[in-house]
Amino acid sequence: MTSGTNVSPDGPSDKMTPAPEDRGRALIVGDDDLSAVIPDEILNDLGFIPVRVTSVDDAKRICDEVDVDLIVMSLWIGDESLLPALTTCMDRSHPPAVVVIARHDQINDAATAMRGGAEDCLFLPFSESRLERTLRNALARRGGSTQPPPLAPSPSTLQTRPFRPTDTPSTFHGLIGRSPAMRALFDKIRAISTSEAPVLITGEVGTGRTSLARALHNASPRASGPFVAVDCARLDGTECLTRIEPGAADAQSEIARASGGTLFLDRLDAFDNRAQMRLLALVQELEASALPDRPRLVASLSAPAAELVDNGLLREDLYFALNVIELVLPPLRMRREDLPFLLESTLARVAAREDRALPLLTAAARRSLLSYDWPGNLRELENVLRGLVLTAGGLRVTAENLPVALVTDRAQARLSAGRSEQNPARSPTGSVAGLGALLGQRLADIERAVIEATIAAEDGSIPRAARVLDVSPSTIYRKREGWTEDEDP
């Protein structure tokens, strides 16, 4: 199915292909495993002569000597990164369309490649149909395909530049963050990783408490041991403790399973008072144990501990027994510096999981996603991006494609932000009663906020919004096109 290194087959094909003199060059850079999943037939059908190389030096040489229209490349060959080859090949007046092939543990390298000019990324494994679709879309965006995919948007409206932040994200055992709060959290994990003391994790719903517990496990000398997670909210307190405690009748206890590793009790406050009292005794027994392979106990709470104790949802003595070290996960609204990197990595991950092309975000869509408060935190972010991946068709995501909640939230923010600081003495009283946050704003901003909010209220339907606002749909389309031109770089 494939050819060897530096071979350019022109043999017969079942499908009509351009004459050799009319065909471009497709450079495939990777080891033999990559060659096995990039068949010549697909490249021939796209109108290309495949040229295969297995080293960075050969890739650079080919780019220097031959006009290359398409590159399909691994991120690594053995221990050698191929990103320098990408830089060389992109450093020309008419750079080729580039698609990188990555494993799921290479998300950060894939993001670097996208920032370096790659049009798309495919995560192994993938189907031949997915490969062909991705290559066609990449070529169409780069403008180098003689066979553009059907239903592609016109060049005048296509946002061809993927989201490429200027900085590289900091990562720590699967956690992503470069904000001060996250860097401080990483430092604290490093400091406590070798200890056997219990750890209490707190954070809002969806902030990634289990991921934090796993990062703590992986950063510790216990990383080679088991990580056993128990969701206390999914089980009755007595049933959950029966599973956890030594001597479980129906199966090996979770404590035994976690021997030499970490036992993570998620949403501990879901236990009733009686179950918490039994757990307290178990915690004290574990702490007093001299067994060298006893598991480290890590627990999480679904709300601040003080609030849970005050409301009688968490026993104070159990809290003090567990709270030797507390790790607090900040919500997304408190770590906005991390949102660009989280958007990029999460989008790539969900696209790979759904076996879909990686969509491009327009500037307006990006701004909406970055300005949203994300009350559901990482869980909400992943769900929203997953929906966009499934509905974007492998092309682009505009502000109009975003969920109603995000559009409404942004419209309300426009109305509430205003310019009240310029008129601090004014208040909505007397003849201006009820106008509230509208005071002091530009008429254009008020008009835009009302139009966007009305469209959101009508489930994204511009014709229905036009009827509500008593204007023609073309008026709204024209205004929105003007707003997009003002916003997009």
Image (cartoon, rainbow, N blue to C red):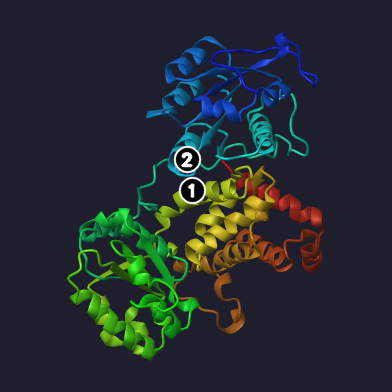
Which amino acid, by three-letter code, is at mark 1?
Ser
Q: Is residue 19 above or below residue 421?
A: above
**Residue 107 in the image, given as x and y percentages of width and height:** 46, 43
Q: Is residue 5 above or below residue 444?
A: above
* Within-10-Å neighbours for mark 2: few <14, some 14–19, many 20+: many
**Residue 398 in the image, given as x and y percentages of width and height:** 64, 50
* Residue occupying the point 58% across, 62% down: 410
Q: Which mark is residue 345?
A: 1
Q: Looking at the rendering, which quadrant does residue 421 occupy? A: bottom left
**Residue 437 in the image, given as x and y percentages of width and height:** 55, 72
Labels 1 and 2: the sequence-earlier one: 2
Which quadrant holds the N terminus? top right
- Dot 1: element: helix
Kindly tell me whether residue 371 is visible in this rendering.
Answer: yes
Which amino acid, by three-letter code, is at mark 2?
Ala
In the image, 452 versus 441, the foreground residue is: 452
* Residue occupying the point 55% across, 37% down: 121
The residue where tag 2 is placed is: 111
Verify CB contact (< 8 Å) between mark 1 and mark 2.
yes
* Within-10-Å neighbours for mark 1: few <14, some 14–19, many 20+: some
Judge left or right: residue 52 versus residue 258. right
Q: Which mark is residue 364?
A: none
